Image: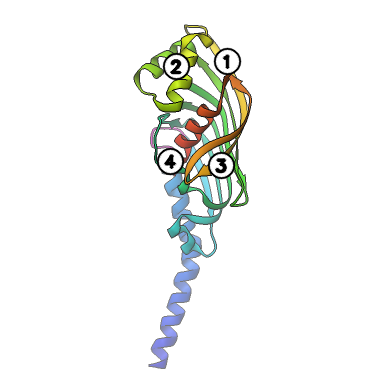
Amino acid sequence: MRRISIVAVIALFVLAIAGQFVVPRIAANKAENQLTKDGGTATATVDAFPWPRLLFKEGDSLQVHADGIQLPLITADTKVLSGIDGFDDVDIQVTNATAGPFKIAKLTLERRGGDNAYRTTLAGTTSGRAIATFAGSQAGGALGGFLTGLAGGALPFGDQTVPFDFETTLRSDGGKPHAVAVSGNVAGFPAGPLAEAVAQALAGRF
């Protein structure tokens, strides 16, 4: 009986050690697949000790580098940040992405320490024609108002590209991104709604 107990303890110990290597890699693979399901490439690294924290969407760090991915830019009430809020450190870097009518050259979502706000940078281009088409067919809520304002005359109509480049501080409001500080604008319009929508689209992949 004692021998069986010792064997069981050893088996559990081996499983725990194996899980520490295997489960974070499985979580990273899942993130990569979610990010690239509509194209592009992604590399993710997930660290969590002990690994069962991942069962509760918690961990030590989440690092992602993605390129050429597509993000569904829609207004939603889902608590998308809850998928990454449980990580102490978050470092997500995206290049050459598409989000609705926006071509994104660079997008970052970073946080150091689980209780701190996220820092976001967003740079890219759009056009009046792309904004008008998207605003009339898909967007609603705060994002819809933002896009309608742009389409209503803030941007030159047609395919002329208009650049944007700004930084935002985002807090998770029960899993929903909320812009509390924005440095920069899009054609004179406050960029908060766009920052929230893009962060929501990105976090929704996790």
Residue 59 versus residue 118: which sits nearer the camera? 118
Residue linked to disc 1: 187
At a point 53% along the width and 30% down the height, the residue shown is 195
Q: Amino acid at mark 4?
A: Arg
- Mark 4–mark 3 distance (CA, rounded to whole Å): 18 Å
- Closer to us: 57 or 148: 148
- What residue would you read off at disc 3? 171
The residue tagged 2 is 148
Mark nearest the camera among 2 and 4 is: 2
State which region is magenta: 34-40
Q: Which residue is mark 4?
A: 205
Q: CA distance from mark 2 to mark 4?
A: 26 Å
Q: Quadrant of residue 8?
A: bottom left
What distance separates the C-alpha of mark 3 from that of mark 1? 24 Å
Q: Residue 132: x percent and y percent?
A: 42, 13
In terms of sequence position, does the residue under pointer 2 or pointer 4 come before the other?
A: 2
For the N terminus, the quadrant is: bottom left
Numbered disc in front, either 1 or 4: 1
Q: Position of residue 174 (x, y in %)?
A: 47, 46
Residue 180 visible, this angle:
yes
Few, some or many C-alpha atoms within 10 Å of disc 1 (few <14, some 14-19, many ≥20)?
A: some
As rendered, which of 198 and 21 lies closer to the eye?
198
- Lower sequence index among marks 1 and 2: 2
Residue 30 image offset from top left, x and y in percent: 42, 48
